[in-house]
Amino acid sequence: DTAVSQTPKYLVTQMGNDKSIKCEQNLGHDTMYWYKQDSKKFLKIMFSYNNKELIINETVPNRFSPKSPDKAHLNLHINSLELGDSAVYFCASSQAVGAYNEQFFGPGTRLTVL
Amino acid sequence: SQKIEQNSEALNIQEGKTATLTCNYTNYSPAYLQWYRQDPGRGPVFLLLIRENEKEKRKERLKVTFDTTLKQSLFHITASQPADSATYLCALRSESSASKIIFGSGTRLSIRP
């Protein structure tokens, strides 16, 4: 009965490759997010979707493209991977987009680019 | 630019004592402040939310204060236990629904028996 799930948990790949990370939430939430946590543990928002619509799009290279096929899923596709993309990527969801809503995080995907 | 600082990267205290973690911010006017716990290899887990017009919030052994004049939040864990050992993150958000949540880098708390 996992609330927010991500696959894969670990991803090791070569520079220049294209990869995807999938996220699903079974909480019935309207809003989903992607975060990047770097080696210094800073958790930085990348994207946010509300009811499948993009509402937050931080300054992220356009090699990163989120896709939300439905409210329960938010996938992250990364083209032409670079060494600096190595990090842990977290998906999260919240009931609604309002600022008072707590966020539920997935277990993270550790991406290593060689 | 907006900045959040958590008082120390690591805090080590004796079991049974009260742990106090600090979150300071600059160039920001948050409407809400949240605290999360993160264990190694896991995603953050929500603990408490406090609004700008609230001075204090409690939940079991946890207490959070929010001082918008000092631009500071304090997070207390009373009667600390080794199981409380984790990284604690504060996060700020303004009222706008389109606003992003900004996280601090966290304080790694270790409770020794």
Image: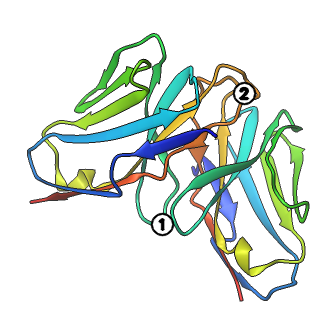
Name the side, left or right, on which A45 lies relative to B51: right
Name the side, left or right, on which B81 lies relative to B64: left
Name the side, left or right, on which B58 lies relative to A18: left
Q: Position of residue A78 (x, y in %)?
A: 85, 68
Residue type at mark 2: give it. Val
Q: Which mark is residue A86?
A: none
Which quadrant of the figure has residue A112? bottom right
In front of the other: A106 or B29: B29
Q: How is the image coloured?
A: rainbow
Residue shown at 49% from the left, 60% from the top: B42
Residue type at mark 1: give it. Gly
In the rendered view, would you say A62 is above or below B30?
below
The local secondary structure at tag 2 comes to loop
Which residue matches tag 1? Answer: B41
The local secondary structure at tag 1 comes to loop
Name the side, left or right, on which A103 lies relative to B12: right
Q: Position of residue A103 (x, y in %)?
A: 59, 38
Residue shown at 65% from the left, 19% from the top: B95
Residue shown at 25% from the left, 35% from the top: B76
Q: Position of residue B12 (x, y in %)?
A: 19, 57
Q: Position of residue B18 (x, y in %)?
A: 15, 40
In the rendered view, would you say B87 is above or below B50?
below
Which residue matches tag 2? Answer: A97
Q: What chain letter is assigned to the residue under label 1?
A: B
